Each structure stands twice: as structure tokens, then as C-alpha cells.
Amino acid sequence: MSDIHYEIRGRAGLITLNRPQALNALSLPMVRTLTGVLLDWADRGEVVAIRGMGKGVGQPASPAPFGAFCAGGDIRFFHQAALAGDPALEDFFSEEYALNHLVHRFPKPYLVFMDGIVMGGGMGIAGHGAPHALRIATERTKMAMPETAIGLFPDVGGGWFLARCPGRIGEYLALTGQVIDGAAALTAGLADSVMDSADLPGVWDALATQGIRGLANLRERRGSGTDTQLAPHRETIDRFFGLPDVTSIVQALEAAPGDWARETAAVLRKRSPLMLHVVLEQVRRARSMTLADDLLMERGMVRQCFHLRPGAASETVEGIRALAVDKDHTPRWNPARIEDVTPAMVQAFFESPWPAHAHPLRELIADQL
């Protein structure tokens, strides 16, 4: 079986990400396969559903049908391609963002089984904001946009869907990269329902025979868990992460009493200072954008991440090196302190490398929502 398995079974189109050894991280061939399948299925079947194979319990050679949705893009590939000047890196982001927009515009029910890891590029194919999407989380869901830890920003439309979380939850999740469970994903507006992971195989199989009729009660399911991550801190999150800039946020957290403020400030101090400033600007700009506009902006931003400082000097290349290549977990951020980032450094990420007519996603300009 390839890295993606897909079939029309009865009334449903069923897609399985099948790269469990990499937690279903997306490669360029996977992005291309998903795009082709969705384009082909736009007028076939009643519903489309997507899941990720898990590693299984104690049986790495026998993956489980659920348990890890998608850990994001293949960051080791990003690192290698950036250092080698491989043009496939440009293709990956252009085609991935076009896929994100295709998911958003998909014309029929699109069910996402967000069991296990749901991060980065996995969030991008989860149908956030899509009118026909049904995002199902479980008690095993581990959801995050952790890009500031690798000197990147929450891309794949992350600025757009995080900006639409209630209050300032979006800024909080974007800056800290906090991992949340299914119950907290409901609070954040990043899931539509939560069900027990044990129920997923039955729901999946029923789609083939029931089609749209099988969706009737899924959206109402809320599971048995209580949100202990976001709900208890809503007022505090809004107060701190509504401040005007990153320096104000971190210094206010450091001056505040209590473990939550102290621990949150400590997390932010470990992230890329430069990208924290860029990300806060990204989310706040995206609040007034369409998804298409946001993806156009983010495509320029990601190019700047790899080309403003090319090769090993890139903040993103350095962050990936420290986390996933050398695994020393000691990135050499530049600048090293949040207080040393200047507005000019931030603004450079929002200057498009291309005129509108030459933008890699220029087809979205005429196809905005």
C-alpha cells in the first residue's frame, strides 16, 4: 500500500493517510495524490472522509486504522531541500496551500477523523472553516500549531483559522504552540464534535452504507471529557494575549503571579523571538482576510523564511536542525531576545517576493471567498 490509500466504497469516498512510521507527515507526492483524489471526487459519492493510520500498540509492523491523523509537513525534507537549493521545496508549499484551499472549497460533506496527532499540515487538511467539514476529535487528540519552536509560523492557513478562535485563543495557540486535547479543541472552535476513539471504526464503516444519513448525529456528540486546558484560563488568555505586542505579552506574564503565567512566559522565551513577532502580526492581519488572501500572504512569508537568510542562516533551517536533525534542542535564534526584534525585521516577512501576476497561488486571487 502506498502512503495514501483511497477508494469509493458505497456512498462514501474514503481516504487513509498511510505513513504511520512518520506519523503521516505530508510529502509532496502525498499532497499531489490528495489533490488529485479530491478533484476527482468532487462529483462522486455523497461524502468524503479522511483518517490517518496509527502505529498500533506494541505492533509497529501492523498499523492501527486510527491513532495518528497527521503530524504536519516533512520537516527533515524542508531542512535538506533548503540547504541543497532543491526547487521541490517551493513546489511543496505552493501545492500544499492550493490543497488547503481546495479542502476549504470542497462541495460536499468532508469528515476528518482527528484522532491522535493533528499538527501543522495536518491542521491544513482538517477543513477548518469549510462549510461542509465535520471535524471529529477524540480523547486521544493532540492538536497544535507548534511552528514557533522551529523558527517557522503557523502556515497552511493557520493565520486565518487561528484568528477565528474565540477571544485571543488564536494568538495564544499560535505563539506558544500549546498542545490541546479534543475537549479543548471544541472550546477553540477547531473541532465540531468529540467521540470515543473506540467508536471511530464503526462510524467509518457506516459511511459506506449510510452516506449523508450517517452524519445526522455526529455533530452533536461531545464526549465525556471536560476542557481543563483552555476554558479555565479564557479570561487570562484574552487579557495577556490581547496586548499590543510580543514584548508586552511576555513581560506582563513574567510580572504576573501564579504558575500559569510563569510557565507560559517560560515557553515563549524558548521560541524563536523573531518568529513570535512575525506570528502575532500574521494572526492579527489574517483576522480581516479571506482564506485565499491569507494563503497568498503565507506563501510569501514561507519563502521569506528560507530566503531572507538563505541556507543555514535561515531561522527555520536552524530551528529544524536543533529539533529534528542534530536534536540538541538548543537553537541559536537570531536575534536571541524578544526585546531585540525590530519592526523592520518583522515587516520583511510580509513583503511579497512576487508581483501579483507571478504569484505561485495567483489562481486564488480570482477565486476568493
Image (cartoon, rainbow, N blue to C red):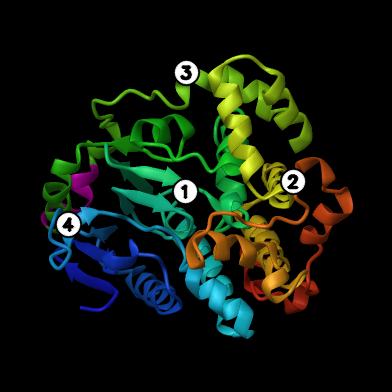
Q: Is residue 245 visible?
A: no
Q: In which quadrant is the C terminus drawn?
A: bottom right
**How far across and down, in percent of the image, does residue 70 sit?**
37, 58
Which mark, by number, is residue 128? Answer: 1
Q: Mark 3 or mark 4, which is nearer to you?
A: 4
Q: CA distance from mark 4 to mark 1?
A: 27 Å
Q: CA distance from mark 3 to mark 4?
A: 33 Å
Which mark, by number, is residue 56? Answer: 4
Left or right, 43 with reference to 276? left
Q: Is residue 18 visible?
A: yes
Q: CA distance from mark 2 to mark 4?
A: 39 Å
Left or right, 247 with reference to 65? right
Which mark, by number, is residue 183? Answer: none
Which label's residue is closer to the chain start, 2 or 4? 4
Q: Mark 1 or mark 2, which is nearer to you?
A: 2
Question: Label 2: which residue?
Answer: 277
Q: Residues within 10 Å of mark 4 (few under 14, many from 20)?
A: some
Q: CA distance from mark 3 to mark 1?
A: 24 Å
Q: Is residue 1 magenta?
A: no
Which mark, by number, is residue 232? Answer: 3
Cβ–Cβ under 8 Å for marks 4 and 1 = no
> Tag 2, which secondary structure?
helix
Rendered residue at 58%/73% (across/down): 94
Q: Mark 3 or mark 1, which is nearer to you?
A: 3
